[in-house]
Image (cartoon, coloured by chain):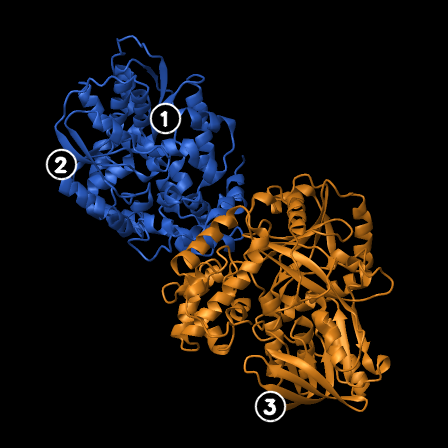
Chain colours: A blue, B orange
Amino acid sequence: MNASDGLDYAATQLARASLDHCVKCTICETHCPVSAVTDKFTGPKYVGPQAERFRHGESVDHSLDYCSSCGACTLACPQGVKIAELNGQARAVMKSDHMPLRDQLISQTTLMGMAMTPVAPVANAALSIKPLRTVIEKVMGIHRDAPMPKANTQTLAGWLKKRPKPTAKATRGTLVFFHGCAGGYFEVETSKKSIEVLEHLGYEVLVPKQGCCGLAEQSNGLFDGATAKVLKLCDELRSAGRDLTIISSSGSCTGMLKHEAHLIMGVDDARLADVGTRIRDIMEFLLELYEAGELPTDFKPIELTAVYHAPCQLKSQGMGQPALEILKLIPGVQAVESEVACCGIAGTYGLKKEKYEIAQAVGKPLFDKVKRVNPEFAMCDTETCRWQIRKGSGAKVEHPVFLVHQAYGLS
Amino acid sequence: MKTLSADVVVVGGGSTGVGVVRDVAMRGYSAILVDRADLAQGTTGRYHGLLHSGGRYVVSDPHSATECAEENAIISRINADAVELTGGYFVATQVDDPAWGDDWAKGATDTKVPFEEVSVADVLKAEPRLNPKISRAFAVQDGSVDGWQMVWGAANSAKQYGAQILTYHRVTGITRDGDRVSQVICTDDKTGEEVRISTNFVLNCAAAWGGGIAAMAGCPDVQVVPGAGIMIAMNHRLTNSVVNRLTYPADGDILVPVHTVCIIGTTDQKADDPDRLMIDWGEVQQMMDCGELLVPGFRSARAIHAWAGARPLVKDSRVGAGDTRHMSRGMSIIDHSDRDGLKGLLTIAGGKLTTYRLMAEKVVNAMCAQLNDPRPCRTATEQVPGSESGRNYVITHRLEEREHDRYDDQILCECELMSKGMFTRALADQPKGSFDDLRRQLRLGMGPCQGGFCSMRATGVALQSEHIDIERATGLMRLFLKNRWIGIWPILYGDQVRQTALDNWIFQGTLDVEHLPGPTHEEVV
């Protein structure tokens, strides 16, 4: 697939055929967290199966850019209309001739991580300085109050290089770990704990050198770059060994490999299909082990009641909420389901100055619930959502694998 | 009884009739057009929406091809707001002989139909859903045209020149004074009142119904054979250009993108009665097979509505009586002074929507000749009201309009993005109109839900507007749903079944629409 094919696909093929299934029932509209808080967005049914009939490769309805791509609509649709995918494609086509520099830059997640790690304390300090953020908002269009990742002084690669090699012999075979950009640079602890849990279970964990999945570029309509990135990543993950199960604790990036790159950008490549069928979210993997009777449940009790929020991009993978099932196995843990569709951030959506307020309004019921249930701690599977919930609620928010790690006595 | 008078009475409010009344009025005659129903409710509203490039006829009917090519350019300009310049292709599929393309290209050159041979790769890039097995392709200047919009544009132009347009006026008699026509007698079906129009000249533009009109004036045996063809609208555009099969004109040889849908057509069966056209299931299957040949996967796409139209083909002794496909597509003018010894009556039939203006020009010329009153035709140069800007229709129009008024107006018909404001304005212009009359101007209920959601909203808004009372509201809604259903049941498969089931639950299960208190007599038109 060459540079322009992704957009051509979006302009002409789309997930468009699925619009034929729409019966106007409006269930998607009732699930849309964005149209619930703003009338700037005309709603998923309007923008998707309705407006698409009026498009001819061009999109004149600029309000569709207010779709956050959370995918709650596609998940809710009982008829199988790929609503969010349609919207993502239409947006990519609409923005193709005037892509904002801001959207091109904030989608370069690897670049951000690499640039910030060596100067982590400085970068973190800089991002907490109000006047600087105001300048960034003016110049870049990133809202001054938008949640920003905390840079780490050590990358996952750095930790892997320096840590003592695992001494226990691998009894269960070999897995490949996909950490994603955030899991490599910002949310390094999540990756470390995931690897340690898998090793504790008896697996050898291979972590090949790997780049970005391109999700942020895809959701910003930059299909060429995203396609190149996702295929390069497939090559990297495949280089670790054939037929090995790939595990990730980066929920939304997993979705990119499982379905989004194919459905939204039309990437039709055997490498992607191979990786997409082999990859598992870590909690999904643990639940599969449990259901096969292969997960040790010698969990130490943890007295904790906290909100668990399943991110939109995890739910859109159609695997239910495996983290909830796993957390139930840990004595003392009361995971309270968030029962909201989306935290509002939706990748890079909530960072943008024109959407920041909307994203905060979308997330408010979740922030309120966290404050009510346990203002100190909450759980969520994806990185940017954790930043959003931390910022919105003030709670410490971690991946549910933290509790599994602790319950196995690893921390 | 009401009495009116006019220099000319035009019978029939299809494309030919409105073209004629516009031409007559622009030449300075006083004119009245009567139709038994709404404008463009007959054949003009029941076709596939093609504005011919002429390419279809370059081999089979060269004279028509040239006329189409010339009129295509004129109609695209004078009826700009009704025409979309989609462009079109003639493609040879795996069952068509690519060598026939040489005959076709020679015909196109001879008939001055603009064309260009294009590579299969370029066609597939422009229309990626097209059958990848096509072996040869020519690009032509086909367009699509909204027949209703075109007709209303011409009618409004005629009105600006003083013509009266009387819809739902059914002709019941034509009286003669010696060897001259003297009066047209109508019944106003909305009020039951008789209307007598004194006139010197009657132009019979009733097309497939024209034989009956001529007979009323005592001119028997005018044979306009209804050539029935079915068409099926698919839920969205599978191609954005017109796609024709590169073959001698045959059934199911064209796919036309019009507004939000694309239409596959058509068949050709001799019919006995243009008011009773059946949609045969075998013909539906035939259209699906033809669609599959042009766009693989066509059968699994969603069909939303089917209809049949009656071509008004003047019987030609040169072809067998049952072979309507090869009866002349050209226009025929019957001068009843020669044929029946009656002055002041011309019957016109045949022709095509694309050549509606040219047909009008010819018949009005013939009238002027009979009256010995030559006046020049000006219809080719002046744009109709609504088309003054010269901007053609584009598919994104309504999406862009709703983007701008979405905070200020509601949307009643979601499928076709028709706002409440559009509906209330049209209703105020036509307070006695049925919802189908409004539909033809607004596309109310013409999308995938086929009235499932919009018809009840429209009914509520119409009632609030105080143009109608509660009983008439119920009657109008029931009639609208009934008429939609006529076009749904022949294509009831796949996704449209789910929609129909949901609509049925809403109307029968929740609203119990059959048992709502209705008028003592049901609305019938």
Please tell me whether residue A139 is drawn above or below residue A251 in the rendered image.
Answer: below
Please tell me how crowded label 1 is: few (under 14), some (14-19), or many (20+) other residues with Cα within 10 Å: many
Q: Secondary structure at mark 3?
A: strand
Residue closest to the far left: A303
Whichever of labels 1 and 2 marks the residue nearer the N terminus, that label is 1
Q: What residue lies at 43% left-to-right and 78% top-to-bottom? A: B467
Please tell me how crowded label 3 is: few (under 14), some (14-19), or many (20+) other residues with Cα within 10 Å: few
Please tell me whether residue B279 is drawn above or below residue A334 in the rendered image.
Answer: below
Residue B219 placement (x, y as % from top left)? 80, 79
- Tag 2: amino acid: Glu
Which residue in the structure is indicated by mark 2? A376
Real-space Cα separation, disc 3 to disc 2, in angstroms? 86 Å
Residue A258 placement (x, y as % from top left)? 42, 31
Direction from residue A101 to residue A339 in the image, left or right: left
Which residue in the structure is indicated by mark 3? B2
Which residue in the structure is indicated by mark 1? A280
- Tag 1: amino acid: Arg
**Nearer to me, B440 or A401:** B440
Instruction: For marks 1 and 2, give the one nearer the viewer.
Output: 1
Q: What residue lies at 69% left-to-right and 51% top-to-bottom? A: B252
| Contact flag, marks 3 and 2 (Cβ < 8 Å) | no
The answer to whether residue A97 is seen in the rendering is: no
**Nearer to me, A139 or A333:** A333
Q: Secondary structure at mark 1?
A: strand
| Contact flag, marks 1 and 3 (Cβ < 8 Å) | no
- Tag 3: amino acid: Lys
